[in-house]
Image (cartoon, helix red, strand yellow):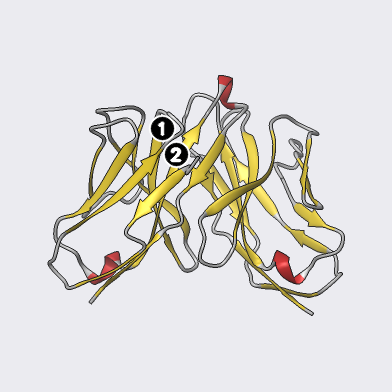
Amino acid sequence: NAGVTQTPKFRVLKTGQSMTLLCAQDMNHEYMYWYRQDPGMGLRLIHYSVGEGTTAKGEVPDGYNVSRLKKQNFLLGLESAAPSQTSVYFCASIYFGTGGRNTEAFFGQGTRLTVV
Amino acid sequence: GDSVTQMEGPVTLSEEAFLTINCTYTATGYPSLFWYVQYPGEGLQLLLKATKADDKGSNKGFEATYRKETTSFHLEKGSVQVSDSAVYFCALSEPGFQKLVFGTGTRLLVSP
């Protein structure tokens, strides 16, 4: 049982280049999330999905796009990378349970992205 | 909106010292509360949780009690080890909102 797998683990981009980060989960969860982690700012939600074919904006969505064509995969795209997007990106697959009482989040190991 | 406030780090302790990391929250409803831990180079993993007032979550010697009257969920451990060095995140989730709201994280450094 792999849980949540993110690829790639590291990437260096030049300003203006594009890339796609892949998140795959094998737990059949409906909810998937993309966060970015920056020093002193904790985890900030970029986009999320409440099921196959759905996406929604989080608190810092600008400059990113997402797609959830298959339930197990959640893709994060950067169309034109900027140095401000240098960060560590985490994907999470979350099970909320009945009434939210059994909530548990499963995280990937992260993607360290540097934009120069 | 919902928010979580954690104490600033880093917290630096010697091995076997007592640990407290403070966490307070603001929520519109009755949230579940969580502590997640992030070891170097890894993603976050659930450490413990509590789903109703006065519940105590515990795991690996860590404990936290859900205090509704003070809207707090402080993390404690009686005797820390070097291997506990990590970043600790407090988080909440409200029923029906399908989001986890995280604090900014507190880095713990334990020296031998």
Residue A108 place in picture, x, y as percent: 45, 51
Residue B62 place in picture, x, y as percent: 78, 52
Circle 1 sits on which residue?
A31
Are the residues flagged by discs 1 and 2 in contact, CB closer than 8 Å? Answer: yes
At numbered mark 2, what does the secondary structure look like: helix, strand or loop? strand
Circle 2 sits on which residue?
A93
Residue A110 place in picture, x, y as percent: 42, 58
Name the residue: 69% across, 31% down: B51
Please give left or right for residue A45 compared with residue B75 in the image.
left
Name the residue: 14% across, 61% down: A80
Mark 1 is surrounded, within 10 Å at the Cα level, by few (under 14), some (14 to 19) or many (20 or more) other residues, namely: many
Please give left or right for residue B85 compared with residue A26 in the image.
right
Please give left or right for residue B73 compared with residue B78 in the image.
left
Q: Nearer the viewer, residue B33 or A12?
A: A12
Compared with residue B52, is residue B76 higher up or lower down, i.e. above or below? below
Q: Nearer the viewer, residue B41 or B78?
A: B41
Q: CA distance from mark 1 to mark 2?
A: 6 Å
Mark 2 is surrounded, within 10 Å at the Cα level, by few (under 14), some (14 to 19) or many (20 or more) other residues, namely: many
Please give left or right for residue A46 compared with residue A42 in the image.
left
Upstream in the sequence, badge 1 or badge 2? 1
The outermost residue toward the bottom is B112
Report whether mark 1 lies on the same chain as mark 2.
yes
At numbered mark 1, what does the secondary structure look like: helix, strand or loop? strand
Residue A38 place in picture, x, y as percent: 43, 65
Chain of the residue under label 2: A
Name the residue: 63% across, 28% down: B30
